[in-house]
Image (spheres, grey):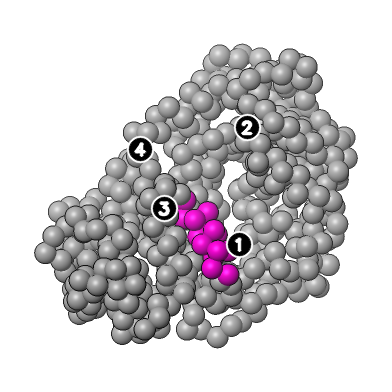
Amino acid sequence: MRVDRAREAALDALAACRRNGAWIDGALKQVLKRDGLSGRDAAFASRIAYGVIQSRIYLDRCLARCLTQRPEKLEPLLLDILRVGAYQILLMDKVPVNAAVNEAVEMAKAHKLSRAAGLVNAVLRNVDRRRGEPLAFADELEALSVQTSHPRTLVERMVGLLGAEEAEAFLRADNEPVPTTVQTNTLKTTAKRLRAARPTTACSSCPSRATRARSVSPKRPLSAWICFTVSGTGDLEGLRAWREGWFTVQDAAAKLTALAAVPKAGSFVIDTCAAPGGKSFAIAMCMEGKGHILSCDVEEHKLRLMEAGAERLGIECMEVRLADGRVCDEALAEKADIVVCDVPCSGLGIIRKKPDIRYKDMASLTGLPAIQSAILDNASRYVRRGGTLVYSTCTVLPEENERVTDAFLRAHPDFTYDTFALPGPIGTVEGHITLWPQRHGTDGFYICRMTRKE
């Protein structure tokens, strides 16, 4: 029996993450390209690979009660095969159990784990038989950790920040499907024209479902600006509207960061940590393509991606430059009307899009505020008198957010928090705000606006 290509691709992506420390999105992209998978096969592989990463703690607990040894004691590839099979059995609708089990057995044989084929069959059959039995937990925190597949240390941190009820809502939101959010490129078209174009592409989020058209509809809760949510998992880059630069993919929270800067036509803006370019693109649209945006990043290969994005969108006012956000360019001192610092962070606000982030060692994040503070401190030197400084992260931890900006203002009395307005239900913000997926339906994000005194 030949192993199903989609399942094998998912297994290869998971193995790449384990062996090379790769992120699942990058690993999966490489595997799909290598194997020439697209459409339903690519969607099926993606769902399994992301799902296993997202649900790993829960899957391992379900496997543990069907094994005579701890899952982590198994050969890593064998454990990955068991996770792939268990995910299909426990968490995918309309995938026949026999197909999930038989394919897992064939994968074990194909990878010369033939002596383990019987174990794979027995364990997965037992997983299926016991799926209705409740799992046992030592306490409520362990239950929340396993049921939402977040490490206990992260669960404890969120409970401490939010309380048990809202922490559970946040953790469960991390596991919910995330619609793609699209921003209309107002330099090339209008929301009305994009809507009339009815951009559609094949969607196959589950191989057992019939292919249906991708549809675009306004995101009502944040409808004060041009923002659409896109259902399905088709290939946006295959659409004519994409190729012609009529829209870009960007979460509402990232767009709000650009809006908080209040850029105007003719402004000089410095985006200090710009890659992959989304905020620079959004700022250019707010500026009607007039002015100058200097988009900097420390990784050279990302500059080419930003240039390509700007070209597709028809943005001519944007210049990309290789630069370290912590190193001052004296020629730019006090020259910028607006400086944006979307600094490197723990990423705990975007777990719903990058599920592997949840497994980061919390202790390893302690050095981030020093880096963030250094970038913010340096960026402030570029702001002219009366100019604006915007600091943002895609995390929800206070030590990377308001504690950084509070400390900055104590050290820089010539800056102050500045009230700003955001569209829709958010309204007036007194200097800074943390957005939460369970509250706002966006990525977890921190946005802060400061002004340099005249």
Sequence-wise, the earlier of marks 1 and 3 is 3
Element type at mark 3: helix
Q: Nearer the viewer, mark 2 or mark 1?
A: 2
Q: Say how many tags the image has.
A: 4
Whether residue 310 is visible here, answered yes or no, is: yes
Which residue matches tag 1? 180
- Residue 301 sits in which quadrant? top right
Q: Is residue 142 above or below residue 336?
A: below
Which residue matches tag 2? 298
Which residue matches tag 4? 362
Q: Amino acid at mark 4?
A: Met
Circles 1 and 4: CB distance less than 8 Å? no
Whether residue 220 is visible here, answered yes or no, is: no
Which residue matches tag 3? 17
Sequence-wise, the earlier of marks 2 and 1 is 1
Q: Residue at x 50, y 30 (%)?
A: 402
Q: Which residues are magenta?
A: 23-36
In the rendered image, the residue lying farthest to the front is: 112
Element type at mark 4: helix
Q: Is residue 121 above or below residue 61?
A: below
Q: Amino acid at mark 1?
A: Thr
Q: Residue at x 60, y 15 (%)?
A: 412
Report if residue 30 lies within the magenta region. Answer: yes
The CA span between labels 3 and 2 is 24 Å
Instruction: Rate crowding at label 1 as few (under 14), some (14 to 19) or many (20 or more) other CA atoms within 10 Å.
Output: some
Q: Residue at x 42, y 70 (%)?
A: 8
Q: Nearer the viewer, residue 372 or 124?
A: 124
Q: Amino acid at mark 2?
A: Val
